[in-house]
Image (tube, coloured by chain):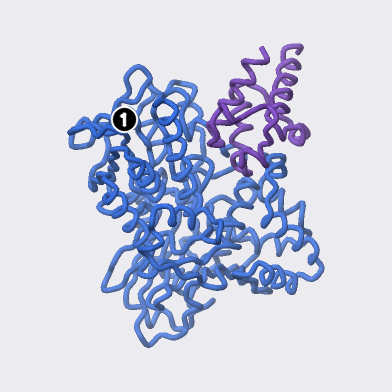
Amino acid sequence: MNEHIEQDIITIIADVSGFDAEEITPEKNFFKDLEVDSIKAIEITVAIEKKFKISVRDEDVPKITTVKEAVALVNNLLNQKNYK
Amino acid sequence: MTKVDGNRYDAIIIGAGLSGLICGCYLAQAGLKVLITEQHIKPGGYCTSFERKGFTFDAAAHSYGSHRKDGIVRKVFCDLGIDKRIKITRYNPSDTVISPDFKVSFWSDVRETITDFQESFPEEASNIENFFSLLVNPEPAFFLRIRNWTLKNLLDAYFKDDRLKSLLSHPVYGNSGASPSILSACMGAQIITEFLLDGGYYPDGGMQTIPDALADMFRTSGGDLKFSCPVQKIKVKENTIDGIVTSAGDYIQSRLVISNCDARQTFLELLGRDIIGADFFNVITQMTPSLSAFILYLGVDNHFHNLPKPGTSIWIQSQYNFENVDSAVKKRDFSDIGGYLTHVSPDKKSLISFINVPFINKKYWDDNRKQLSESFINKIEKDVAPGLSKHTVCEVVATPQTLFRYTLNYKGAAFGWAVAPSQLAMPDFRKPSFIQGLYLTGHWTTRGLGISGVVNVGYDTAKRILRNRMKRN
């Protein structure tokens, strides 16, 4: 499950950020490494929310500065959704 | 890239607005065979100029922002070689807001702007410092966290004085066609940063010189540009773009279509409900456009010297509630209007003034335009240009219907969708997930408006397309 999610998220980030999917490794920082500005950060978040049918809460935002963290957050939100 | 013959292109762009032209230039310069079709007789969309009785008027856009060292407009103009073709002057201050109690300006030097605001609102000095610091050094994570905030929420979080909030909101409202309680905080902040703190740029010869230079560059790079060529249909085969059909009935093939025209037109008319599906049909038919505008263009004689400062956008606020437009429109009288913009052309020969208004209908504006324009001229005369009516030798009025007629923007919307938090950065308005090979660019993409916004989207769209092609090849 994890791999699929990671791949889908990387595809979204690649599409919005302009970096090749191969360059987007789990440790990459959105803002420092991938030149993501405010509007691109929102585009990525909205696209992730739509793709996985989840809602990222405001308090979750500080937890997503790297690709790895984004994948963990999406996994977490999906798990919570499935338990409901 | 293989150049293909006859009626087949690597990419077709519908609409020669700035975003379409910029996207087209990048694609053509990368070697793609590109066609741009434009329904009007000239390029530019809302960034055009027209002539009447020897005067040149800018139709809507009358200056622009984000031309600083790292600004997106400067970058794109340099990339495409436009900077060598047109001379850009920056007018200082770019914007001045005048209310019954205050006069504050956005100066080329941000420090000067901060001081100007602090002198008017000393008790808010540190809030002003913090607010402008947030804008000058935008922290993406912060804006992500407040993505559901409106501009009003943001200003309430920083300031106490409602008059200061109103002075900051007015030019943003005028530059977005959405009130502070509707507009996304992120978009509002971007407008202050790009249009006001880095605004006031103007090309010698008028705004039309920008799209003209881009169109010329596009053709020089091998692109085809057809004017008076409305598109009737976007053709799709098995969920993949196959080309367009023009109103003249020509079927022009391409696997890539970029729509720089109105989003409703793109999805509801050029594609149709069967192709976009019921779900997306429901999404798009419930979306709200930005406001339109009532625009006055006045040419003055050589003996008139009471015009406000040329090149500066001057926002007049007779009241702190600048949104009392509906009642003024209903009363058919602009003499009490809360706020409006006046911009004198750098050659001091003409001025453009506008008020954000709703679309209503054609008949309404046909019946009332004269009465409204008279009251509007009287208002400008009283506020900032004594003697204006006596020295006016040319008067032209544009209503929401005029804006619609020239650009086909839904309800004459001056800035695409009203960029509310719920209408911000929606992926299907950039690259719809249900059709392969379709992109949107321009101010209907829910992620950028005004000149710097659409330039940014045009650049970004071209880069996305070229990257995807590179990957495939």
Image colour for chain A is purple
Visible residue check, residue B426: no
For the point 57% across and 62% down, which residue is it? B198
Residue type beneath disc 1: Ile
Crowd around label 1: few <14 · some 14–19 · many ≥20 (10 Å): many
The C terminus of chain B lies in quadrant:
top left
- Chain letter of mark 1 equals B
Q: Position of residue B392 (x, y in %)?
A: 36, 78
Residues B152 and B92: in front is: B92
Residues B65 and B323: in front is: B65
Q: Position of residue A9 (x, y in %)?
A: 61, 25
Report helix, strand or loop for mark 1.
strand
* Marker count (numbered): 1
Residue B348, compared with residue B75, is above or below; it is: below
Visible residue check, residue B168: yes
**B337 on left or right of B411:** right
Q: Position of residue A62 (x, y in %)?
A: 76, 36
**A49 on left or right of B333:** right
**B7 on left or right of B376:** left
The residue at which mark 1 appears reads as B234
Residues B263 and B430: in front is: B430
Image colour for chain B is blue
Residue B134, compared with residue B394, is above or below; it is: above
Q: Position of residue B203 (x, y in %)?
A: 41, 66
Tell which residue pokes out farthest to the bottom in this image.
Answer: B303
For the point 38% across and 34% down, which residue is it? B266
For the point 31% across and 53% down, which residue is it? B217
The N terminus of chain B lies in quadrant:
top left
Residue B454, compared with residue B84, is above or below; it is: above
